[in-house]
Amino acid sequence: MCMKSLIICRMGFCDDVNAAAETIAAEENITIISHIDADGIAAEAILSQAIARAEIPVQSVFVRQLEPLTMNQVPADKSYKIFVDLGAGQQNLLEAHGFSENDILIVDHHVSQPCTRHYRQVNCLPYGHVKMSAAGVAYLIAKAMDTANTDLAKTAIIGNVGDMMARETCGLVGLVRDIIVEDGVKHRNVEVRRRDLNCYGTATRPVHLSLAYNDDPFIWGISNNPEGAKQFLRRLGIRQQAPDGRWLVWEEITVEDRRTIISALAEQLIAHGEPVERLLAETYHFPDEPVRTPLRNAQEYATVLNACGRWARPQVGGAILRGDRASAYREAEHMLKNHRAIIRDLLGYIIDKGVTELECVQYIHVGAKYPDTIVGIGAGMALSKLNSAKPILIMCTVPEDPNLTKISMRTTERVVSRGIDLQQAVSNASAEYGGGGGGHKIAAGAYIPKCAEQEFVIRVNKILKEQSGAAGPDHR
Ligand SMILES: [Mn+2]
């Protein structure tokens, strides 16, 4: 047994992982119920491949969230049910549905709901592994089932990055870094760049657009300013285009050019008295994927999976993770294009219509104009075009239920570092109106009754004001 496995064993989480691996191996027929986001799609791909390799029949169902309506999608058969990236917070619902302790396994990383039934669960959160996603937990189980499953570490990394586990810390940390990333590197389908530019789109976007679309950290004259970014690169003498006129992407330019750009960006930040820590990040690359495609790095790969999930085709993302580079990949490319076009449109709508500003929050209601699954992404992007010092709250209608309103909130790392916690604000405020919510400090969402919209916004504003007050008078 390797050192790394011993480390988890001492932490107790290993017992749960091993017990789950044994339980799964003893089942004769399994159904996986997973979530439609990048993490859920990755976690499903990992577990179902591990189960199929163990020659156990397995089928999968994807749901947008686990609620009474979507429970109907869970087949009412004798198969053993594994709930993945969901379930921990909906155990009462599982109980109400009639599941007994022997019927199901929960593989999750969300806060666990108290329940009279003690369902078997593998959850990293109670063990303090807060920077691990469901794909991470699924991977550890797959590895416990068979060490040959370490080829799936790559998929686990995509799920973790897609679930923002690397964002706050500019790289993956904890068990995910020590075990999963190392397994991927050993398997040679993952390459780590320790001090890379902390920037999205390094495999597909022209360098100047990658720089301009990045606002973490925000760099004056470059962030939100494609022309400024282009001139900045020109002044540095960086070759930006191939001989045929095509724009080069970050991963194509020379190591020296990358270094020159990073130092110049650092100088720019220092000149404006801004911190430089977030300029660099550890990034994860996939040398076995074709160059200049979004499959080349974990961040962009996760976007492909999210696009599939948000357009109700999570199985397409799963097929890509299993190696389909033909029809599934073509379909995903199409969805990605559509995904971006609609987000651009939503962005334009938010800017044109304008947000309403309260003291500590800015908000807008987009009604039923856009799919509720992309509104959060639009919120994040709109923020960089608005006053990014103030969190944004977007409301939209829920197609399945006219009495519900979906809330999406986004802010920036800079605001989070001043004590703002959107997860807390949104879940506390929504609970007061009988709704429910969750997420992260930087991004959170909730469902609330439609009739409570106005009061809810005012309540969130008040909570955010309390949070910024608690962080001290200098941190407005
Ligand atoms: Mn997740």
Image (tube, helix red, strand yellow):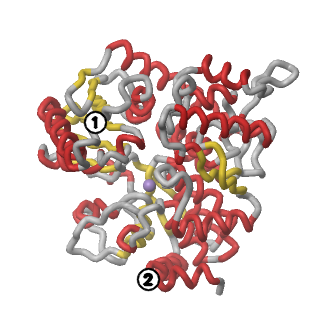
Find disc 2 in the rendering and name its residue: 12
Residue under the point 78% across and 25% down? 237
Indicate left or right for 461 with 201 as reference. left
Q: Is residue 81 above or below residue 28?
A: above
Query: Who's the residue at 39% across and 46% down the image?
Result: 64
> Residue lying furthest top in this view?
352
Q: Quadrant of ligand 1?
A: bottom left
Residue 424 spot, x, y in % from top left: 25, 50
Q: Quadrant of the C terminus?
A: top left
Amino acid at circle 1: Lys
- Of labels 2 and 1, earlier in sequence is 2
Residue 406: assigned label = 1
Q: Amino acid at mark 2?
A: Gly
Q: Residue 226's x, y, as percent?
A: 60, 20
Foreground tag (2 vs 1): 2
Q: Compare residues 180 and 310 and report the one nearer the observer.
A: 180
Q: Nearer the viewer, residue 268 or 42?
A: 268
Assess disc 1: are there few (<14), some (14-19) or many (≥20) residues with their C-alpha within 10 Å of its C-alpha: many
At x 46%, y 47%, the residue is 36
Q: Residues within 10 Å of mark 2 (few under 14, many from 20)?
A: few
Residue 262 found in image quarter: top right
**Total residue callouts:** 2
Vertical placement of residue 386 versus 474, above or below: above
Of residue 11 and residue 93, the one placed in the foreground of this image is: 11
